[in-house]
Image (tube, rainbow, N blue to C red):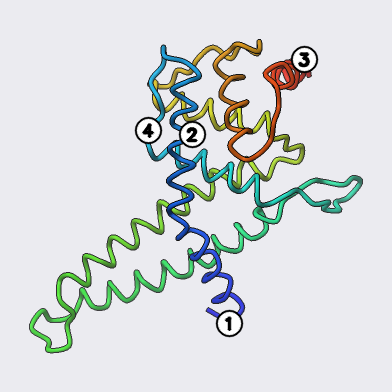
């Protein structure tokens, strides 16, 4: 890994190490799901964390113009950085796998062979890399949308989380201001400092349906 990539990897690691803030936001997301409706199961911690990560990305990475053939597309810095990070993670994973495979193939009596604990730690790290890549890919699929709009995208990730918590079902996608989806989106936006009324959220979601 070159010096620039190493610096980037370190910055992203530091960002992900802000566990206190992420944990606080994840708990707030879980509470928002609970308040939105009592009739449906609340998404688990992993899905609440995914929604929280998306909200952080949305809050910290405003869209910027990206010139494409024939039109201007809106993208975000986190999309570009996220794709770069995924490439480095993939390379890092290959290096760790190679080291583990080499060590594991050696004679167990070799004096230099690491203790079993080292192999166990590496296996856990590989699992963590896989989980991180999965979360980042989920976020990038949403953030890469050419016509990304916060209300619609928060509604999309919330619906996905609800579906996973309820065996593939989710609360009816009603778009009136009192509907669970609208109530959740209003609460989620408030968590990142964006004040939007339920009526405004409802109007955006209804306009999507008419397209």
Dot 4 alpha-carbon crowd within 10 angstroms: few under 14, some 14 to 19, many 20 or more: few
Mark nearer the N terminus (3 vs 4)? 4
Residue 136 position, x and y percent, is 53, 50
Q: Which mark is residue 210?
A: 3
**Mark 1 vs mark 4: in front:** 4
Choose top left, top right, bottom left or bottom right for residue 184. Answer: top right
Q: Horizontal placement of 195 versus 83: left or right? A: right
- The residue singled out by tag 4 in the image is 44
Q: CA distance from mark 1 to mark 4?
A: 38 Å
Residue visible at 82% across and 46% down in the picture? 73
Mark nearer the N terminus (3 vs 1)? 1
Dot 1 alpha-carbon crowd within 10 angstroms: few under 14, some 14 to 19, many 20 or more: few
Find numbered disc 1 in the image and state the secondary structure of the residue it sits on.
Answer: helix
Q: CA distance from mark 2 to mark 1?
A: 37 Å
Residue visible at 47% across and 35% down in the picture? 28
- The residue singled out by tag 1 in the image is 3
């Amino acid at each position: 890994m070159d010096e620039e990539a190493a610096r980037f990897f370190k910055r992203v690691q530091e960002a992900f190490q802000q566990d206190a803030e992420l944990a606080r936001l994840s708990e707030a997301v879980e509470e928002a799901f609970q308040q939105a409706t009592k009739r449906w199961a609340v998404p688990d911690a992993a899905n609440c964390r995914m929604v929280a990560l998306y909200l952080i990305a949305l809050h910290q990475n405003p869209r910027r113009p990206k010139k494409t053939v024939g039109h201007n597309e809106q993208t975000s810095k986190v999309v570009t950085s996220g794709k770069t990070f995924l490439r480095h993670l993939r390379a890092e994973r290959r290096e760790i796998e190679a080291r583990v495979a080499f060590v594991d193939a050696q004679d167990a009596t070799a004096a230099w062979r690491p203790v079993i604990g080292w192999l166990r730690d590496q296996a856990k790290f590989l699992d963590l890399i896989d989980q991180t890549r999965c979360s980042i890919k989920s976020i990038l699929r949403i953030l890469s949308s050419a016509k990304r709009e916060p209300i619609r995208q928060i509604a999309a990730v919330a619906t996905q989380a609800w579906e996973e918590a309820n065996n593939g079902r989710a609360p009816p996608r009603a778009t009136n201001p009192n509907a669970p989806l609208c109530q959740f989106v209003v609460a989620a936006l408030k968590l990142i400092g964006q004040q939007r009324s339920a009526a405004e959220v409802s109007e955006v979601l209804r306009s999507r349906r008419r397209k």
